[in-house]
Image (cartoon, grey):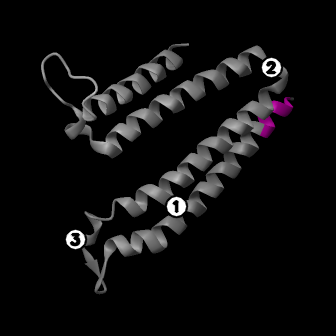
Amino acid sequence: MIEIGLGFLLVAGALVLLAGAMGIVVAPSGVDLFPLFGVIGTALVFAAGVLLVASGRTRRAIAQHPERRHALRSTRLTIVALLLVAALAIGLFLSPGPFNLVRVGGFPMGYYFAAQGALVALVILAFWWAARQNRIDVEEQGP
């Protein structure tokens, strides 16, 4: 599957970026891309690669074991939901800088996003997960 190969390429690219930043590997042209990506960008490239590999492996497991299709699809949905919760929990609180430029009621807008936006996003995520899980259950039961 092509997504597994692409995932391995992204993971390798992230590792090369880190190796270049640590001075282990020097590009022939002397260009260091780590300042362009930074730590968060490199971590996102690495995470995208890992997610592509995991998605490809799950898709392959579903094709090879049709009797376990429901469990594998439910597990994949749960993992995606948990990753979105982690992104909300970490990403929202690490990037309030641009939002703090705007003030609402004397408080920075980043405060409102962290205090109330995360809760609203979690409720929306819970309803989305429940709807997707119901659709998986209906599809797997058959006619």
Q: Which residue is mark 3?
A: 101
Q: Which residue is mark 2?
A: 66
Amino acid beneath label 3: Leu
Question: For the view shown, which residue lies furthest in the front direction?
Answer: 24
The N terminus appears in which quarter of the rendering?
top right
State the extent of the magenta-drawn residues as a range: 137-142
Q: Position of residue 31 (x, y in %)?
A: 15, 26
Q: Earlier in the sequence, mark 1 or mark 3?
A: 3
- Which image quadrant for residue 114? bottom left
Q: Residues within 10 Å of mark 3 (few under 14, many from 20)?
A: few
Precedes in sequence: disc 1 or disc 2: 2
Q: Position of residue 69 (x, y in %)?
A: 78, 26
Q: Secondary structure at mark 1?
A: helix
Q: Earlier in the sequence, mark 2 or mark 3?
A: 2
**CA gap, disc 1 to disc 2?**
34 Å
Residue 42 vertical placement versus 124 (above, below)? above
**SS class of the residue under badge 2?**
helix
User: Which is nearer the eye, 49 or 74?
Assistant: 49
Foreground label between 1 and 3: 3
Mark 2 Cα-neighbour bin, 10 Å: few <14, some 14–19, many ≥20: few
- Residue at coordinates 40% horizontally, 23% vertically from top-left? 12
Vertical comparison of 106 with 142: above or below: below
Measure how far apart labels 1 and 3 are at the Cα level. 22 Å
Q: Amino acid at mark 1?
A: Ala
Q: Which residue is mark 1?
A: 121
Q: Is residue 67 in the magenta section?
A: no
From the viewer's perspective, tell me whether residue 76 is left or right of residue 34.
Answer: right
Q: Residue at x 47, y 23 (%)?
A: 7
